[in-house]
Image (cartoon, rainbow, N blue to C red):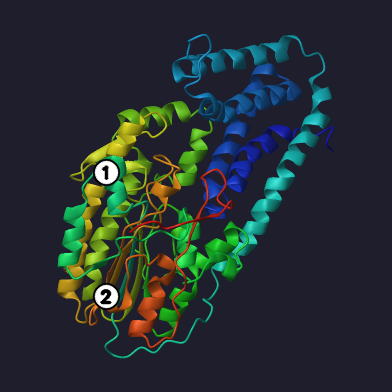
Amino acid sequence: MLKKYLLYPILFALFSVVSLTANNIGQIFVGEMTRPLIFSLALAGILFWILRRLLRDSHRAALASASLLFLFFSYGQVYSAFEGASVFGLELFRHRILFPVNCVLGALLVFWILRKVRQPSSFTYALNLISIFLLIYPSFTISSALLRQLASNGPSKNSSAVTANSNSPDVYYIILDGYGRQDVLQREYRFDNSEFVNGLQERGFYVAQCSQSNYAHTLYSLASSLNYEYLDTLGAKDDAERIALLKHGAVRAAFEARGYSIVAFPTGWSMTEWTDANIYPNYGKSFTTLTEFETLFLDTTLLRVATDYDRLNSKTTPYSQARRLRVLSMLQTLKEIPSREGKYFVFAHFVIPHPPFSFGADGEWLEINVNTASHEEIADAYINQIIYINREILQVIDALQANSAIPPVIIVQGDHGPPPDLTNDPAVRMPILNTYYLPGTESAEALYPTISPVNSFRVVLNRYFESDLPLLADESYFAPNQNHERLTLFPNDCK
């Protein structure tokens, strides 16, 4: 069979998607590979059909197809690996050079297969076997993750008992991804954020001036805060288990057990999308809207040329449009929740001021390609998004406070500090914005300057739902972007 059937062009097309999915399985739903998979298989099938008609030899067509598919699917990865590198002062790895070189190389490979390869059928067995072996490990990884993801979408586990009454407040957990602490923004980016902080305090918020995140990365940080516990205690061994904790953790279970409806939002990051929430608004996406994984897939291929051109010159690229629609939809929906009947726990994860950068300071369209922008340009874009979201979040808070029949609990918090595109310094990454609106109580009685996210819901459940959860020591564990599991304790020296 392996000597007779020309499987390897199709298997190689499968590998391009399956391997990328396996490498990112902790951040995506398995279903996100569907459209890239259809595209890759269609491309392989069409290419083989065209070459077979031109060359009139199935084995030559298969060998030529596999060669061209290799160049197509590896282009973006080669570009990323060597972007900015130069040889004798000449930048060879730029689209204007790499693209024509890739085309010429493809033509030469087809010419060599057509003119120099006497028995193309002799390659079939080896290439079929290699393609099968390449698929084994990523397929196993995806299958294991799929089983865990299916389990994570099951019913929430029971958590500590809470007691709600008719005066229980709605609870809003608003995450501003990558939002650094005020002193860090001043020190690192010369940005005075006191206007926003003062605005929060004027609205009754407690601002934890020395707060640090418990973890330096979103999945770790939110899995911990939404279970009010550290990950080692929770026993989370891998990303699939952390995602399960994030999606169906102790906090969600506590509110569901008391009859609260859950509100969550599309974020573009499947690990923080609670698609089974009671309310999960549609933000107006179309079939052509690309997910972040689909954009990543295109960037690994020859289509990187087109996507880079769009990101630099177009204001209508589907992915950027979807990102803006998600943010704008979340802002509007948050303001409308107080008008709904019932009790609500709201989980709103804004992927802002974190990249991608698509909002200017006044909300205007702004696109910065972090792969080509300077550090100064990225820093400016980050601060502009802070300026924009500051104004919008204050408007959301005003609407929630003005229109809620019972004053709501509101937590506005960064999951970590400025993102890796800007820094990998723990002194910058760990300090976060962390603010609380706890109506009906003096915030100073329950809160303190160094409170960290792991204790946020311990305070809320104790204050409003008669729980008796002891506060934990506020600890911060930093890990570099290259290895999220290499955790080291990072001290809090804030005074």
Amino acid type at image mark 1: Ile
Q: Is residue 325 above or below residue 208?
A: above
**Residue 132 left/right relative to 213:** right
473 or 483, which lies in front? 473
The N terminus: image quadrant:
top right
Which numbered marker is on residue 444? Answer: 2
Tag 2–tag 1 contact (CB < 8 Å)? no
Residue beneath the point at 58% across and 43% down? 37
Location of residue 445 in the rendering, given as x and y in whole percent from the top left corner: 29, 79
The quadrant of the picture occupied by the C terminus is bottom left
> How far from the left and from the top, in percent, is residue 298?
49, 36
Q: Up-down: is 129 above or below 354?
A: above
Q: Amino acid at mark 2?
A: Ala
Element carrying mark 1 = helix
Q: Mark 2 to mark 1: distance in Å?
A: 30 Å
Q: Residue at x 63, y 44 (%)?
A: 18
Kindly tell me whether residue 391 is visible in this rendering: no
Number of other residues with Cα within 10 Å of mark 1, as a class: few under 14, some 14 to 19, many 20 or more: many
**Residue located at (59% from left, 60% from top):** 240
Choose top left, top right, bottom left or bottom right for residue 413.
bottom left
Q: Is residue 406 left or right of residue 17?
A: left
- Per the image, the residue denoted by label 1 is 383
Residue 468: image x %, image y %?
Answer: 43, 86
- Secondary structure at numbered mark 2: helix
Give the vertical position of 170 relative to 75 (above or below). Answer: below
